[in-house]
Image (cartoon, rainbow, N blue to C red):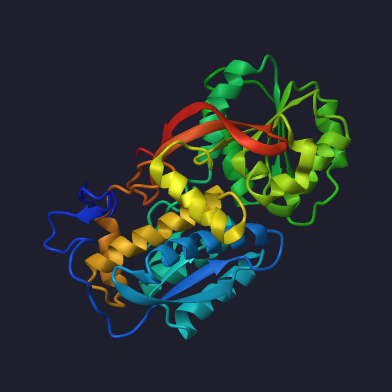
Amino acid sequence: MNSRSTYLLALAATGALVLSGCGGGTLGGDETTSDGPIKIGVLVPQSGVYKSLGDDMLAGFQVYLEEHDNKLGGADVEVVLADEGETADSGKAAADKLVKQDKVTVVTGVVSSAVMNGVADLFETSKIPLVGSNASPTTLTDATYIWRTSYVNDEPGEALGKYVAENVDGGVYFLAADYQAGKDEVEGFKKTFEPAGGEIVDEVYTPFPATSNYQPFLANAKSSGAKALFSFYAGGAAVEFVKQYDQFGLKGEIAHYSAGFLTEGGVLNGQGPAAEGTFTSMNYNYDLDNELNKAFVEAYQAKTDRTPTTYAMASYDAAKVLDLAIKEAGGKADPEAINTAIGKITEIESPRGTWTWSDMGTPVQMWYLREVKDVDGKLANVVIQELGKLGDN
């Protein structure tokens, strides 16, 4: 167990989460006041290859705010948006500005694992909580002020490895973007793939973000004799990769499995029919059958005219975590009190279903196998089965 403290939250009759056993109020109690709006930094890409992910994350956070009269924990908030860009340097510069110049109380967002690694010391030394809603490198194991409402980077691969080993009759080729998240996904996949008897044909990483022509890599995969390919790409790179997978003759010949980011959100529209038949693992899908998800999907579609993604859902949940924590901290712009309150949350009712914090400050949650299918004339990720729960320490 690390330094994060936890205790149980009870569910109120209305379905709202209530902090118990700490002497604090509940979400149903009197409104608290603060000395002024609490500044919330939202650090997401507004330019570069991952802009679409950043747009989803921002929209998910905004949906929660709009549902709660632009208040969190009863306090007025001011959102300060910063452009993460697509490099570790651009993300770190944006985070530095949020913390040192804008004087935010808490930050959420972060798409890139390289950025997360680059800013970890900033938040730990500044004692400013970061409630990340996407990037979650496996190397980030002992932080006190960094939480993530998404997953750990290797979990999409880990959730899928055993299934592929048991359902593919032959070797698997690995092809992923050459940065922390790509390597984490491959290692996670191998963690369950190899013990289940899976055979690795080759493991190749493509330069990021420089690679746009995947033909040489796909040609090698095609001639390798592999029966399936496991990949990791996201954003604009995912569109090009899936299209070229089809163009260069792999679709229909080599089964394609990937972390769910490959076909998540707007990239699926860009990929078009080339994506049909692709299998992915993900911790969320817009069609999960629970009341909170139905309401979230309706609100998100009304705001964006899109179905929500895992990026939007995790950012919605980040806002909920901050709502609970700021309420427990008395509605004040007190970073350390808010961080302590985050650690006391042990159960979150979410559009993905109920989840809890692991000892590392990441979700313990269910994972799903999905396939891209034509649903009423439109391509969609469709849940095929549960792959199991991950996140327990």
| Residue 110 appears in view | no
Please provide percent x and percent y for residue 109. Answer: 51, 62
Say which of 72 and 84 sits in front. Answer: 72
Q: Judge whether residue 18 can be spotted in this image.
A: yes
Q: Is residue 240 left or right of residue 123?
A: right
Near-viewer residue (88 or 160): 160
Q: Residue 36: x and y, percent?
A: 33, 84
On the image, the x and y values in percent for residue 332 come to 27, 77
Query: Which quadrant would the C terminus be assigned to in this image?
Result: top left
Front one among 16 and 5: 16
Q: So how many labels did they put on this image?
A: 0
**Position in image of residue 298 (x %, y %):** 50, 51
The part of the image, by quadrant, that contains residue 64 is bottom left
Residue shown at 63% from the left, 70% from the top: 89
Compared with 184, 134 (above or below) is below
Out of 15 and 236, give the one closest to the viewer: 15
Up-down: is 277 above or below 96? Answer: above
**Residue placed farthest to the top in the image?**
169
Residue placed at 50% from the left, 41% from the top? 284
Q: Is residue 245 above or below residue 226?
A: below
Side of 67 where 202 appears, left or right? right
Could you tell whether 87 is left or right of 247 in the image?
left
Q: Is residue 103 above or below residue 247?
A: below
Please tell me which residue is depicted at 56% across the width and 49% down the height of the picture: 309
- Who's the residue at 77% across and 44% down the image? 271
